Amino acid sequence: MIRFPIAASLIAAIAAPVPAAAELLVAPTRVVLTPEARSTELVLVNKGTETAAFRINIENRRMREDGSLEDAGEARPGEQFADDKLRYSPRQLVLEPGARQVVRIMASAPGELAPGEYRSHLRLMSAPVSAGTTQIAGEPAADNSLSIELVAIRSITIPVILRVGALDASVTMDAAAMADNAPDQLVVRLNRSGTRSTYGDVSLTVAGEKAPAWLVRGVAIYTPNTSRDVIVPLPADVRAKLAGKTVRIDYTSTDAGDPANAGKLLASLTAAL
């Protein structure tokens, strides 16, 4: 087996398409499936100036309390992975500059599948390709082909969630304060309960003003986690604007898998910063 060293990794955390490995544009960056809507498509566009190859794998990941993700082995109590319920195609591809490719994702949800939320992640790994005929690394090469150059390999990870049954979730916001060891970071404590994850934006609005002074998009709390510390880096000008002010902190749903509650206020807290 050929193993590819990963030089950097980006975790998709916002709803809008974002440039990633090898200047790969991916949309959407989060997928929610149900037994009624078992398939969807990812659109990949190579925004770089080099032809690039991409290999797609599926993996299980676990959310830490600070919101970062780590590789998960066997499922812990309350964890339900979707890796054995997902199919996707193609699994590898080559894109010339400006070219696009559709990746189809399908979920199997047999009738006996227990209600709940199942989650795994698709990892898209990329590497520039040598000039000439391209060949995916690890496959037999034709006489006139050249292998992928294993340099500057990067990846982007996309959560794929399968929701089965009538699920719900609620959130409370316990506290918000500037970090003791990082005066440019605000830490917001969120607590989740219920049978599914939550996904939304955290906004900071100075009392008496209408427009948020700062907005963090795509904040998720995955099951089975019941709490998360959302770490919000604040630029100097935003810190100055918030210092000494009373600030309303809102967590608002932007979960495409729960359109009935789009824009719903999930949790709110007023704090003096």
Image (spheres, helix red, strand yellow):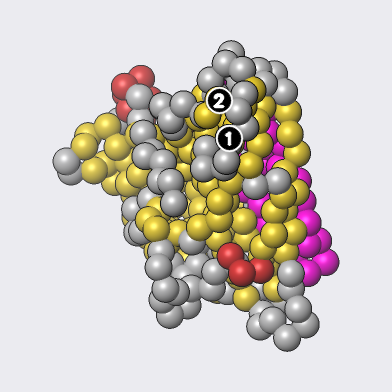
- The residue at 35%/59% (across/down) is 65
- The residue at 46%/26% (across/down) is 149
Query: Which mark is drawn over residue 255?
Result: none
Q: Position of residue 160 (x, y in %)?
A: 62, 56
Classed neighbour count for the residue bearing mark 1: other residues with Cα under 10 Å, few (<14), some (14–19), many (≥20): few
Task: Tell whether label 1 touches label 2 (CB within 8 Å).
Answer: yes
Q: Which residue is mark 2?
A: 146
- The residue at 70%/73% (across/down) is 164
In the image as oriented, which residue stretches furthest toward the front?
143
Q: Position of residue 258 (x, y in %)?
A: 71, 58
Q: Nearer the viewer, residue 113 or 193?
A: 113
Classed neighbour count for the residue bearing mark 2: other residues with Cα under 10 Å, few (<14), some (14–19), many (≥20): some
Amino acid type of disc 2?
Answer: Leu
Q: Nearer the viewer, residue 106 or 177?
A: 106
- The residue at 16%/41% (across/down) is 181
Going from N to C along the chain, the mark reached first, 2 or 1, is 1
Determine whether 93 is above or below 90 in the image. Answer: above
Q: Is residue 205 left or right of residue 34?
A: left
Q: Nearer the viewer, residue 15 or 266?
A: 15
Amino acid type of disc 1?
Answer: Ala
Q: Is residue 18 left or right of residue 271?
A: right
In the image as oriented, which residue stretches furthest toward the right?
36
Q: CA distance from mark 2 to mark 1?
A: 7 Å
Determine whether 39 is above or below 263 in the image. Answer: below
Verify whether residue 47 appears in magenta: yes
Residue stretch rendered in magenta on the structure: 26-48
Q: Is residue 42 left or right of residue 219?
A: right
Quadrant of the snapshot with the C terminus: top left
Q: Position of residue 237 (x, y in %)?
A: 35, 20
The answer, for residue 142, to whether it is visible in the render is yes
Query: Which mark is drawn over residue 141?
Result: 1
Q: Nearer the viewer, residue 91 or 170?
A: 91
